[in-house]
Image (spheres, helix red, strand yellow):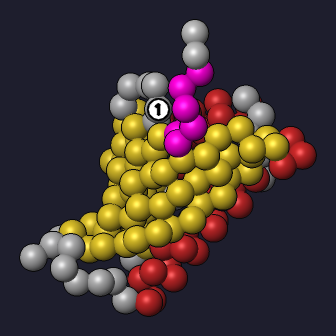
């Protein structure tokens, strides 16, 4: 049954390495490299926005995030479980701008899928753990 078997240490390390590369690409301001971390038919569900599908559109989203001043993203994987042909990862994130100023922190759920022997983000959803701003 899906979710009952833990993933191997090798798979966990591969996901952690993929997360490290993703964060590194963001720090370098490379939206093209970030988009390559996603599968061809990936979809992201960013907070307060509609569904964004496909690598090219995902690249545009991350380009906007970089242009807005985001300089760093810390990802902390907390749990990875297999579900059929995908892995489900739950984790925490921290978003930083200039001088290591934290502007957001929260949680994420990523479905990973193998594509050409590499683990790629297939579905990516995240949201803030910070309280809503009062009007």
Q: For the residue labelled by badge 1, is the local secondary structure a helix, a strand or a loop?
A: loop
Q: Looking at the image, is 21 positioned above or below residue 107?
A: below
Which image quadrant is residue 4 in? Answer: bottom left
Q: Looking at the image, is 103 positioned above or below residue 20?
A: above
Q: Looking at the image, is 66 positioned above or below residue 100?
A: above
Tell me what residue is drawn at x 59 percent, y 21 percent: 133
Q: Residue furthest top?
A: 135
Magenta stretch, main secondary structure, is loop
Q: Nearer the viewer, residue 117 or 105?
A: 105
Reading the image, the residue beneath label 1 is 47
Quadrant position of the C terminus in the picture: top right
Is residue 18 in the magenta section?
Answer: no
Q: Residue furthest bottom?
A: 9
Give the residues drawn in magenta, as a range.
128-133
Side of 8 where 33 appears, left or right: right
Q: Looking at the image, is 65 positioned above or below residue 78?
A: above
Side of 23 where 12 appears, left or right: left
Side of 80 where 92 appears, left or right: right
Q: Position of residue 46 (x, y in %)?
A: 46, 35
Tell me what residue is drawn at x 58 percent, y 74 percent: 17
Q: Position of residue 129 (x, y in %)?
A: 52, 42
Which image quadrant is residue 86 in? Answer: bottom left
Asked if one can make out residue 116 in the rendered structure from this viewpoint, the answer is no
Q: Position of residue 66 (x, y in %)?
A: 71, 37
- Packing grade of label 1 (10 A; few <14, some 14-19, many >=20) is few
Q: Nearer the viewer, residue 24 or 12?
A: 12
Q: How many marks?
A: 1
């Amino acid at each position: 049954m899906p979710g009952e078997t833990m993933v191997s240490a090798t798979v966990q390390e591969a996901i952690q390495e993929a997360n490290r590369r993703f964060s590194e690409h963001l720090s370098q301001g490379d939206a093209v490299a970030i988009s390559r971390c996603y599968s061809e038919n990936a979809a992201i569900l960013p907070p307060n926005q509609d569904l964004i599908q496909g690598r090219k559109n995902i690249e545009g989203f991350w380009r906007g995030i970089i242009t807005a001043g985001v300089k760093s993203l810390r990802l902390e994987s907390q749990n990875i479980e297999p579900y059929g042909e995908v892995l489900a990862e739950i984790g925490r994130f921290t978003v930083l701008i200039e001088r290591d100023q934290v502007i957001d922190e929260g949680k994420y759920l990523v479905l990973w899928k193998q594509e050409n022997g590499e683990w790629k983000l297939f579905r990516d959803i995240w949201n803030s753990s910070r309280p809503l701003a009062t009007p």
